[in-house]
Amino acid sequence: MATASIGARRHRRGHAGLLFILPSGLIILVFVIYPIVQSLWMSLHDWSMFQVTHPFVGLANYAGLLHDPRFWNALLNTIVFTVATVPLQIAIGLLLALKLVRSSWWTIFLRSVFFFPVISSFATMAIVWRFLLSADVGPTAAWLRSAGIAPIDALHTPSLALPAVILVGLWKNIGFTMVILLAALQDVPESLKEAAVLDGANPWRRFLNVTLPSIRHALLFASIIAVIVSLQVFDQVYVMTRGGPLFRTETLVTYMYEQGFTEYRSGYAAAIAWVLFLIIMAISVVQLRFFRYRDVD
Amino acid sequence: MNTILKALAASSLLAVGLASHASAAPVTLTYWSGFTGGDKQAYEDLIKKFNTTHTDIQIDYQEQPWDSIAQKLPTAIISGAGPDLATPDYNVATLQQYVANGLALPLDGLIGTGADQVAPGVLPQTVTDSFSVDGKLYAVPANFATLLLYYNKDLLAKAGIAAPPKTMTELQDDAVKLSDGQGQYGIALADNATIQMWPVLIWADGGDLISGKCSALADPKTVGTVEKWAALIRDKKISPVGSTGQDADNLFAAGKAAFEINGPWAAGQYKAAKVNFDVAPVPVGASGKPVTLASTVPTIVSSKTAHPKEAQAFLAWWLSKETQAQLSTSAGYAPSRTDMATDPSITGNPTVAAFTAQVGNSRLYLPTEKDFAKIDTGIFIPAIQSAEQNGNAADALKSASDQLNSLLGCQ
């Protein structure tokens, strides 16, 4: 009898739980799940937003990507952007977090300074950076000229445009990584550090063997987010270079935007989106395995 | 019985009264417009004027960035939730997509001699050709502009140049003289995200992008023109490389470029920047014929509109002489009518008169190509940028020509 009563209570609690999550579930279903499924459906069709009917083409869009040099160029640029950005973002974010971990008015002020770009609009900041980096009308160029140095037009130089976009991305996102790692550093048990000091470990050994393992979960989170954000880079590229010069900064998302909203090939653009999704999924799985494998706790 | 009859009579009277009231209410047309730039006020004033003078039709004028319209308009029309009127894109060729997919209403009743109609032959032929498919007109111009050569009078005077150049050779020589290789440019030549300037240079020398139905990018005249200008840009630094239209405008406004090929919309910005400028016809090139670029934005009526008659009435009003005169004088555009060249409102305004005088020499850029975006951003612009950066105009244009022919279905 008692067992039946417990079971009935669990059943009612289960119902109540479902009802509580129903509103959020509906929102997720309509605004997240449905668009994901719809985009997969679109990628299997010759889909244009101008047309009422959309012929089914199977994997033709995906096959088209294999033979599309612009797609491979965009993929390469995206990978280069990610490989350059993520390690630097983590390393510089960690360095800043280590330096600013102790709370004082000065460190609190600096934390705000580094975090400010994170909360500002990326498109707006990209416009500002475009102006700053302009070799013709930008203040940086004017200062350099006044110092007798010829300014470099980075945004219009094929070999320098992507590094310039990477630097702006780093400037924008380092603060986010810093805050994540700062919180993790502040949670590292003092007892572990003291024990390491008593064992004669120098600062570098303490960092490697105590601090890093203790903040591994935060490093995992920060690196996964950094990779996802980097692979989806769009704002600063679209505003600063529009993928130029000569497609040297065109990324998967800017190419997807052009295909979907300039050439109106929504099905093809959806196929690019799904390829990007699979790449992000694969990299995320590898990252999770890498950090779990190193788990010594 | 009497009570019932009285009640019925009263209800009938009430219904008739309500119906009369309903039929007197104006028809409201929604109009999505992409004119959010410097000429925005001119359009708003005209819409306000229409609404004030028309009690039977009211325009709900909604301005949005061009990107927003491009993303929303097709699906909005298909779903029936779209506007009655819209400017789909500042690129004329986009109209072809709307027509091919049945999203734009043919304006059968617009051309004629009645009230709420536009007389035959009033629209420029280039507009009629570009806005018609299979003999039916599908749009009217929201505006019509030509490009002229803006020049900075102070910079020219300082360099001892007495008058703006009349030939392309003079323009090139002047541009070299006015460049110092250290951020002071002879000309601001944009090559992307702009109302195109490079086609004007190519047409002036007798070249083209498409000739007949096939690519003319590898034509010797096209290649020669691009080679010449690219070499001057690379070697003599007469213009920055890779500029957008906005970059070029900023350069001219900042007094860092002496020439720019631009439309009437830029004049306000330059006046506000206190540039001492004037305009002159685009110099004549090796072809010997004056030529410039025409720019026009189509206004369509949605194929799903519930008020086609009222929408066409608005378009007829838009194309009336009075409306076109006000648009020209307030925004600097040439009128979209061929019968106003001697109108005092046009001839009395030197800037408007200068732009209007070039209407007959103007050409639209890829007006009927459905793959306009692919040709412009995917083929033509990269070829120009490659020529500017690498000095390989012949190879870049040959490769671009092959791609273009493949797209056009030419061998």
Image (tube, grey):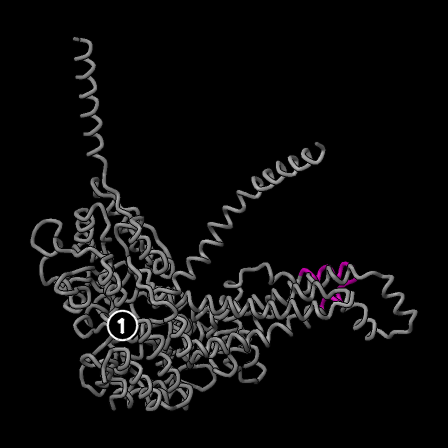
Q: Residue B341 in the image: x percent, y percent?
A: 15, 65
Q: Residue A175 in the image: x percent, y percent?
A: 65, 64
* Residue under label 1: B147
- Asked whether, in this view, residue B114 is left or right of residue A105, the answer is left
Q: Residue furthest top?
A: B2
Q: Report helix, strand or loop for mark 1.
A: loop
User: Would you say residue A111 sits in the magenta stretch?
Assistant: yes
Magenta region, residue range: A96-112
Q: Residue A56 in the image: x percent, y percent?
A: 33, 64
**Nearer-the-camera pick, B134 or A103:** B134
Q: Residue B141, relative to residue A282: is it above or below?
A: above
Name which residue type carries label 1.
Leu
- Asked whether, in this view, residue B226 is left or right of residue A21, the answer is left
Asked which quadrant contains residue B91, the reply is bottom left
Asked which quadrant contains residue A296, the reply is bottom right
Q: Residue B261 in the image: x percent, y percent?
A: 31, 75
Identify the image quadrant of the C terminus of chain A.
bottom right
Residue at 55 percent across and 75 percent down: it is A81
Residue at 16 percent across and 68 percent down: it is B129
Q: Considering the whole magenta stretch, tell me its main secondary structure.
A: helix
